[in-house]
Amino acid sequence: MENRFPGGSWPVMLTPFTEDNKIDYDGLKELVDWYIKNGVSGMFAVCQSSEMFYLSLEERVKYAAKTVEFAAGRVPVIASGHVSDKIEDQITELNEIAKTGVDAVILITNRLAKEDEDDSVWIENCKKILENMDPNVPLGFYECPYPYKRLLTPETISWCASTGRFYFLKDTCCDIAQIRKKLEVIEGSNLKLYNANTTTLLESMREGAAGFCGVMDNFHPQLYTWLCEHYKEEKAKEITEDELKTLEKVSDFLTIASLIERQYYPVNAKYHLSEVEGLHVTLNSRTKDKSGLTETFKEEVRDLNELTKRVEQKIVR
């Protein structure tokens, strides 16, 4: 499974919509090609950034299948898509996603127990899911912040790793101490940790994280690809002192730049793709009214792109 889930940068994919608010599959194909052109290691489809809680099951399944089709084996594709409250309904949703040919099906941690329920409930529900899915389908999990964020404890993660069924953890704790504990319990298992937080990304990779899986790959995936690749050079001790300083400066820039995700995401990311990257992607979203993207927000996106270009000029060898 090593090559199936490579380290590096994995974008959380957006959903392009037509003007009448249907999924735009022509736009999705452009988006897949854009991610791959910018060097991503894999793609996470049907996630929160994809507005999955606002997609029908039919849409979620078709979105995952089309992403697999458009990727055409160039990079692996993982997908989630279980949004129901009842575990029985979630099992149906997850099995439908599994049929699309994705490389892994990702469980949303907050779907497996209510906010006031402890991890014993979570594990029992997880067991039900495992018992009702093909054991040959690789799984992962994502600490999605909506509708509430459920961070898994090291003990629960250890249990997941012990099943041998889990390969991908999209971690959203944003805390290097917690990340270290998680990395300790998954060491030697199939499970790899992909950090969603830019501030702790470089340090987490130094501690053993496999890479990045987050929002900012919708603005400058090429820089996250660069950071992950050049971290590998640092690990292999094939990096000079000046190159190390550049690596850390790029990490610092990405940390500050990541604040833009608080500025009317995902509409601002769709504006970037449309106006800056030239993709045929509308600003339409099912979670936010596109009219809320002010001129100030737009200017921030354009300014970020100019800063990204300057950083790229300095790191090109």
Image (tube, helix red, strand yellow):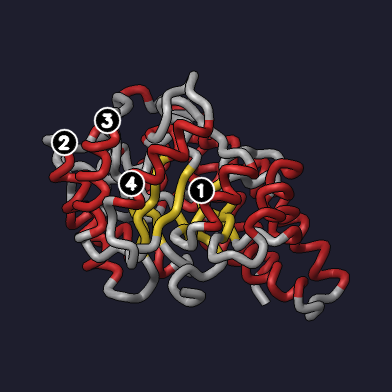
Camera-side residue: 253 or 83? 83
- Looking at the image, which is closer to me, 35 or 76? 76
The numbered dot on residue 21 is 2
Q: CA distance from mark 2 to mark 3?
A: 28 Å
Q: For mark 1, give the secondary structure.
A: strand
Is residue 191 in sight in this rendering? Answer: yes
For the question of whether residue 28 can be seen, the reply is: no
* Residue type at the position of mark 2: Asn
Quarter that holds the C terminus: bottom right
Vertical arrangement, residue 152 with respect to residue 3, above or below: above
Q: What kind of residue is marked 3?
A: Lys
Q: Could you say where residue 95 lies in the image, as x and y percent from the top left?
A: 23, 52
Tell me, for residue 129, which label it has, or none. 4
Q: Position of residue 308 (x, y in %)?
A: 59, 54
Check whether the beta carbons of the residues at disc 1 and disc 3 lie within 8 A of each other: no
Q: Residue at x 20, y 44 (%)?
A: 92
Along the polypeptide, which appears first: circle 2 or circle 3? 2
Binning the other alpha carbons within 10 Å of mark 2 as few (below 14), some (14 to 19) or many (20 upward) gives: few
Q: Amino acid at mark 4?
A: Ile
Q: Amino acid at mark 1?
A: Gly
